[in-house]
Amino acid sequence: MENLIEILRHKRTLVADGAMGTMLFQRGLKSGECPEKINLKRPEILEEIVHAYIEAGAEIIQTNTFGGSPLKLKSYGLDDKAEEINSIAVKAAQNAAKGKAFIGLSVGPCGKLLKPYGDTEPEDVFNSFKRQIGAIASFGIDIICIETMTDLHEALLALKACKEVAPSIPVSVSMTYDATPRGFFTIMGVTIQQATDALSKAGADILGSNCGNGSQNMILIAAEMKKYTNLPILIRSNAGLPKLAGDTIIYPENPEYMADKAQELLKLGVRIIGGCCGTTPAHISAIAKVINIFDVTQGSPIIE
């Protein structure tokens, strides 16, 4: 396959996959269970999900390792299984993709508050990310996807761990922002400009936002990010904000709506578009069709 970064710089927009957790819940994951435990017990489910997203048109597949750092796994008593959990997830994705998609290691928050706001030492967080990334550094993955970050300090520690343990692998860093009357901020009070500037300086290859917002807010976030960076931008919107219907979580944005909004992201020059919570292969299929038409009829701008 061609180099992912070169594709983004000179050729076209890439389609990312949709939600992993949503697909796992459809296959029996219970609320409160550790999603990564499935890697140990039913890795064939991971291959099934990867295959479904590739059939839908996804060109970047993320592994079931969002909570795969030892600190996060410790809350389930699985920290001693971190290397196994991450390696199984990567191998399952590679087996199912068969070279048809780029493989990205999903790296989510550790689930702890760092000092001085919490009781967790930054060094412990850094070492935890090093263990997770080190477990797959030699597996030939295409990108490391640090995502759903609300603490800029934690995101920078994860990025530093990537650069130290796997310096040859491109890294995307995706923050989660909340809409306020004064603009978009992470829950830790970080602005889009502050995050973009700091992560760019620290060596991120791709910047983005995922989770916490539906498509319309993500368009606003992407437009704001474009003011502060020339790096490729990644957007993975939720299928709207979830609502409860009895015991069922409902996401209001259907595939057609998200595909329509993807056109606005494309016009802004967003270079990777996928989905987060509530999105399925049906959403990705609709988004992929829009991206393919856009690239054929208008082309994608080259990033200098």
Image (cartoon, rainbow, N blue to C red):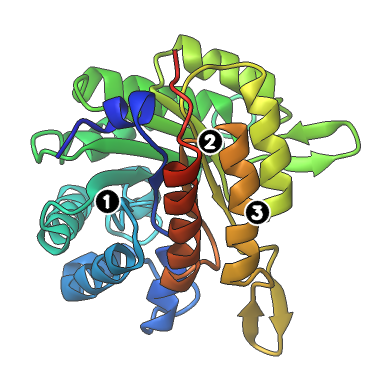
Q: Residue lying farthest bottom? A: 246
Secondary structure of the residue carrying tag 2 is: loop
Tag 3: residue type? Lys
Q: Please give the label number shown on residue 261.
A: 3
Q: Residues within 10 Å of mark 3 (few under 14, many from 20)?
A: some
Question: Percent position (x, y) of residue 112?
Answer: 51, 42
CA gap between label 1 and label 3 equals 40 Å
User: What residue appears at the point 37 percent right and 24 percent down from the top-left corner?
Assistant: 9
Q: Residues within 10 Å of mark 2 (few under 14, many from 20)?
A: many
Residue 250 left/right relative to 79: right
Residue position marked by numbered label 2 in the rendering:
270
Labels 1 and 3: the sequence-earlier one: 1
**Residue 109 visible from this viewpoint:** no
Q: Nearer the viewer, residue 230 or 154?
A: 230
Residue 80 drawn above or below residue 110: below
Labels 2 and 1: the sequence-earlier one: 1
Which mark's residue is nearer the viewer, 1 or 3?
Answer: 3
Residue position marked by numbered label 1 in the rendering:
79
Residue 16 drawn above or below residue 41: above
Tag 1: residue type? Asp
User: What residue appears at the point 48 percent right and 26 percent down from the top-left corner?
Assistant: 301
Q: Residues within 10 Å of mark 1 (few under 14, many from 20)?
A: some
Q: Nearer the viewer, residue 46 or 117?
A: 46
User: What residue appears at the point 52 percent right and 17 percent down from the top-left corner?
Assistant: 230
Secondary structure of the residue carrying tag 3 is: helix
Count of marks placed on residues: 3
Q: Residue lying farthest right? A: 181
Secondary structure of the residue carrying tag 1 is: helix
